[in-house]
Image (cartoon, grey):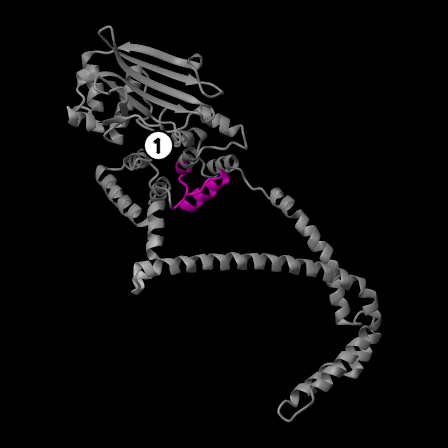
């Protein structure tokens, strides 16, 4: 008895018997526009075994009972109830937890049973395959035709054998082992890699204080250097602006005395560079390059009065242009906005000669959602939706990253979900059922589910 109280996880079929089951909830609930809710409920009432299904739709969230568009109740036979329990067997039930951070649509699974103590009610299937089988069972109980066994399985999707799935699972595990490092482990590794006094042969007590002082000093020096660099850049910018103003003010005077100034400067330089036997060629070169005759010609020529004059004019003209360019930077950036996610999606559908229905069915979406996407150029999907459409379009890894960026997302090396998606795209596997199975096995949110 005490062992049962201390136990945190219970296995259905072993710790939870069929007679213990009171009711089971299977719910998809999403605020994604348009909002949606699909719920399946198995329960007992008045000695009857019952199945209830409900679908809610609307243009607001949260959806209420008044938004229900399809509902139905069916009395189950003993055989059907046994099949339901068989699909639950092997799954686990544990204490309920909040999932506000997940941002997903579920499914949210809750099993009410005689030993749940009012809180041991959160259920998880033993495998993704069992979950898919359970969903197909619910669809059959509703009496609706099942066009596809699961999202992503379209007629043109090549079948993946169980042996190939096993190879992919093994390869994925190795890929994650090499590429995924949790943030906490990375921080620990960085701390361990830092040298300590003890590692250099010093006693721990003697090494701790100097190391802390050195780290504090390094941080202070780094901050000081950054501040000095910022101050230097600001000072240089002010000096440059002042220099432009001065050069512009003195431009006229410089034009009048330019030729004389150059001649004087040349004569001073020539005197300073007195010829010697070792570098006799240098003064000869200077004399040839700037001869008196050349100075006379440039002084008389209207367009070649002085190179300094030209430089002064260029600098004076550049100042207002640079200032104007700085003012226009934000406007130019905004004016260069490229394709939106929706525009990119529709363009690639046309380029690949796909139909709209073909793409949104592969992505696990419905016609109503795709209609909302097509009618709104600024539509911003959630990340799982954006990834699902990238898979439906059979994009390469670079194309996927570009398309996600247009929706404001990226594939992060610190996200197990992102690494799994990257792995399958890199291996040319776009079947959502296979990818969702891998996500399920690693405890990650699924990409798409049938409504």
Q: Does residue 121 show up?
A: yes
Number of numbered discs on residues:
1
Is 92 drawn above or below residue 425 in the view shown? Answer: above
Quadrant where the C terminus lies?
A: top left
Where residue 263 sits, quadrant-wise, is bottom right
Is 136 drawn above or below residue 164 in the view shown? Answer: above
Left or right of 22: which side holds 326?
right
Quadrant where the N terminus lies?
A: top left
Residue depicted at 39% across the width and 61% down the height: 210
Where residue 51 sits, quadrant-wise, is top left
- Looking at the image, which is closer to me, 275 or 190? 190
Q: Position of residue 75 (x, y in %)?
A: 26, 9
Q: Does residue 195 show up?
A: no
How packed mark 1 is, by other alpha carbons closer than 10 Å (few <14, some 14-19, many 20 or more), is many
Left or right of 327: which side holds 113?
left
Q: Position of residue 295 (x, y in %)?
A: 79, 79
- Looking at the image, which is closer to me, 204 or 412? 204
Q: Is residue 334 magenta?
A: no
Q: Position of residue 390 (x, y in %)?
A: 42, 38
Q: Which residue in the rendered view is the most extreme toward the front?
A: 205
Q: Which residue in the rendered view is the most extreme toward the bottom?
A: 277
Left or right of 124: which side holds 359?
right
Residue depicted at 22% across the width and 23% down the height: 87
Q: Position of residue 29 (x, y in %)?
A: 39, 23
Q: State which region is magenta.
A: 390-413
| Location of mark 1 (residue) | 152
Q: Secondary structure at mark 1?
A: loop
Q: Is residue 406 magenta?
A: yes
Q: Which residue in the rendered view is the most extreme toward the top?
A: 46
- Looking at the image, which is closer to me, 57 or 351? 57
């Amino acid at each position: 008895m005490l062992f049962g109280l201390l136990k945190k996880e219970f296995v259905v079929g072993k710790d939870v018997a069929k007679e213990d089951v009171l009711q089971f909830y299977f719910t998809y609930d999403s605020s994604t526009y348009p909002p949606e809710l699909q719920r399946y409920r198995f329960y007992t009432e008045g000695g009857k075994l019952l199945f209830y299904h409900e679908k809610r739709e609307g243009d607001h969230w949260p959806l209420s009972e008044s938004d229900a568009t399809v509902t139905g109740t069916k009395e189950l036979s003993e055989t059907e109830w046994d099949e339901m329990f068989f699909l639950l067997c092997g799954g686990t039930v544990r204490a309920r937890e909040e999932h506000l951070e997940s941002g997903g649509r579920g499914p949210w699974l809750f099993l009410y049973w005689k030993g749940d103590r009012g809180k041991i009610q959160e259920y998880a299937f033993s495998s993704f395959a069992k979950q898919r089988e359970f969903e197909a069972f619910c669809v059959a109980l509703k009496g609706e035709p099942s066009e596809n066994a699961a999202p992503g399985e379209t007629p043109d999707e090549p079948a993946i054998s169980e042996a190939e799935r096993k190879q992919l699972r093994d390869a994925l595990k190795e890929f994650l082992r090499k590429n995924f490092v949790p943030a906490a482990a990375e921080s620990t590794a960085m701390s361990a890699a830092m040298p300590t006094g003890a590692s250099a042969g010093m006693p721990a007590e003697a090494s701790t204080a100097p190391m802390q002082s050195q780290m504090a000093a390094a941080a202070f020096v780094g901050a000081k250097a950054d501040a000095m660099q910022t101050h230097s850049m600001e000072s240089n910018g002010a000096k440059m602006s002042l220099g432009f103003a001065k050069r512009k003010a003195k431009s006229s005077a410089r034009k009048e005395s330019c030729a004389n100034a150059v001649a004087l400067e040349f004569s001073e330089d020539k005197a300073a560079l007195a010829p010697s036997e070792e570098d006799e060629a240098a003064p000869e070169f200077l004399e040839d390059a700037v001869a008196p005759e050349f100075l006379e010609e440039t002084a008389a020529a209207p367009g070649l009065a002085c190179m300094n004059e030209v430089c002064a004019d260029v600098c004076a003209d550049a100042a207002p242009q640079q200032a104007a360019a700085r003012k226009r930077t934000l406007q130019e950036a905004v004016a260069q906005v490229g394709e939106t996610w929706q525009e990119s999606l529709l363009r690639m559908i046309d380029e690949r000669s796909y139909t709209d229905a073909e793409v949104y069915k592969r992505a696990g979406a419905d016609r109503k959602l795709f209609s909302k996407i097509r009618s709104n150029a600024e539509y911003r999907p959630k990340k799982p939706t954006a990834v699902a459409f990238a898979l439906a379009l059979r994009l390469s890894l670079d194309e996927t990253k570009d398309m996600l960026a247009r929706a404001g997302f990226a594939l992060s090396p610190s996200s197990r979900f992102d690494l799994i998606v990257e792995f399958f795209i890199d291996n040319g596997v776009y079947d959502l059922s296979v990818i969702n199975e891998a996500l399920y096995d690693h405890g990650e949110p699924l990409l798409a589910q049938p409504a």
